[in-house]
Image (spheres, rainbow, N blue to C red):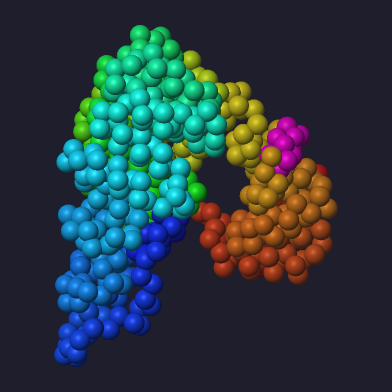
Amino acid sequence: MSLWLRHKRLGLLASALLLGCAASSLPATDLQPRTPRANASDTSIAGHFLAGRFAAQQMDTAIAADSMLAALARDPDNPELLNRAFMAAVLDGRPDALRLARRLPDNGVAALLIMGSEALAGRWDRAESRVRALPRGGASAPLLPVLLAWAQAGRGQHDQALATLRPFIDQGRFRALNALHGALIADLANRPREAERLVRIALADQPEPSLRLAVLAASILARAGRTADATRLLDRIAANGDEVSLAATEGPRRAILSGRGVASHVEGIAEAYVALAGALSGQGVGDQAMVLARLALRIRPGFGPALLLLADALEEEEHLEPALSLLAQLRPDDPLAPVAALRRAGLLDRLDRLEEARALLEELAAQLPGHPQPLTRLGDIMRRRSDFPAAAAAYERALARVANPAETDWPLFYARGIARERSGNWPGAEADFRRALELSPDQPYVLNYLGYSWADQGVNLAQARAMLERAVALRPQDGNIADSLGWVLYRLGDIPGAIQWLEKAVELEPVNGTINHHLGDAYWVAGRQWEAEFQWRRALSMELEAGEQPRLERKLEHGLPAEEFPASLRP
């Protein structure tokens, strides 16, 4: 699940960075009433402010909005409180945001909010004036030509709108963005050939199109009579095999090919907001992305991409119930509805509502009988809960839906292999790991899992060594893979080589109990008993595999047993 929110900044920071606008910058200690008040009232303002600021830092948008609005009600002319209350209201989707925005003439987010409100009311002259008054700098600068074009198109000036975008389509870093929105404007103006030409420019600039670009482009191509090209584009998304491929299943596909992804000029503005939000979230600027997503939802309620973006941000900050509530708002006919269902199941599992998660995934699996993703997600949930037999059974059902496994299907064989191995079915697990490597030979974690398992069993050691040397070359800083190579060298009787790699593994993973245990064994065989005992004692203080602790305790009392020496070095 991606990972859109990394920073916890809120309030003035988002406002200032979003459009480079000036904003009040009074420090928290300057939050004093402008007229003498009773001490109790002062305490109330400070208490609400501090609670709101802490909630904002934790991305608890509901408490942040409640607290900042309460503080502002007690000191309505304080500019710091006004800015913070406004931003908190925006991020929690409160109606108060528009009222407060009208009091913030120099705030860029407020200007965008008011512009959207004017567009929603059909006052396109005012909306265009708002866009023209926005600062030219800041993170949202690439959006300004698109917003201006949509305002012009809203006034019925489609030729002027396309002329506004033309210089940015002909050249520039954001060619695909401007070409796509030009195509959407042309499509709304019932100019299918021009829409097709522009959307092909956007696709050429993005050889690996995002899901949203693919969906919008397919819709435009279908209306231009290029149904085969539209279908091929959706086939590329479906072939990915991950969760977003569900947006190209039969039901969503029919909706994409028969309707408009953007059905009005207001929806086009929301589309522009979310396009920039997605780009910002990918750069670790999650608070600004959330602001833009909220602005989009104010003018386009239920907009699937915005809801998913916000839900991911909230989940990243461990606000699971609000994230779940947002995902439930997607319409059943939204192309993203199956994706949202998968994510809802993951949230339900994290909330320890396993039966609800299982029921949701089974329902989705029944709705999509030719697709493995719902059952794969069920297997993932059961594997994380260490119910390996149930996980293996779910993966089995998922693989039954894969008629002709391709390279992209290797993770499913790998996952079932792990579940089978942990369930005690080594022959089945070994077959799955081999199959995963047939499909994708250079997967370091599959090479590691199979190679280490062989080393631990003392079988196929030469082949295991070759596999693990390849895995180390692919992931040189992975301590677990270095440990596996050291362990196969130990089994082969190459004790100096084993010590070299096991010491490196301990450097990379110093608190891994199993790796320290392995290094202790190698030291003992090398005649370095004191160092061996030191490593074994260290390992006992760390997390260990089941059954490892009593083995370590016996070694500390009696030394390394003969049967655990390499076969060629047993005393």
- Rendering coords of residue 161 (x, y %): 36, 30
- In this rendering, the answer to whether 416 lies above or below 223 is below
Residue 341 in sight: no
| Boundaries of the magenta span | 461-473
Q: Is residue 430 left or right of residue 491?
A: left
Residue at the spot x=50%, y=36% of the render? 174
Question: In the rendered picture of this protein, how many numbered marks are placed on residues?
Answer: 0
- Rendering coords of residue 475 (x, y %): 67, 44
- In this rendering, the answer to whether 545 lies above or below 249 is below
Q: Main secondary structure of the magenta part?
A: helix
Residue 503 in sight: yes
Q: Is residue 506 magenta?
A: no
Residue at the spot x=40%, y=17% of the render? 194
Q: Nearer the viewer, residue 194 or 333?
A: 194
Q: Nearer the viewer, residue 200 or 105?
A: 105
Q: Nearer the viewer, residue 23 or 42?
A: 23
Residue at the spot x=80%, y=64% of the render? 528
Instruction: Find residue 102 and report its image quarter.
Output: bottom left
Instruction: Find residue 97 and report its image quarter.
Output: bottom left
Q: Nearer the viewer, residue 530 or 278?
A: 278
- Rendering coords of residue 222 (x, y %): 34, 14
- In this rendering, the answer to whether 300 lies above or below 258 is below
Q: Is residue 205 left or right of residue 180?
A: right
- In this rendering, the answer to whether 245 lies above or below 37 is above
Residue at the spot x=47%, y=20% of the render? 200
Q: Quadrant of the N terminus?
A: top left
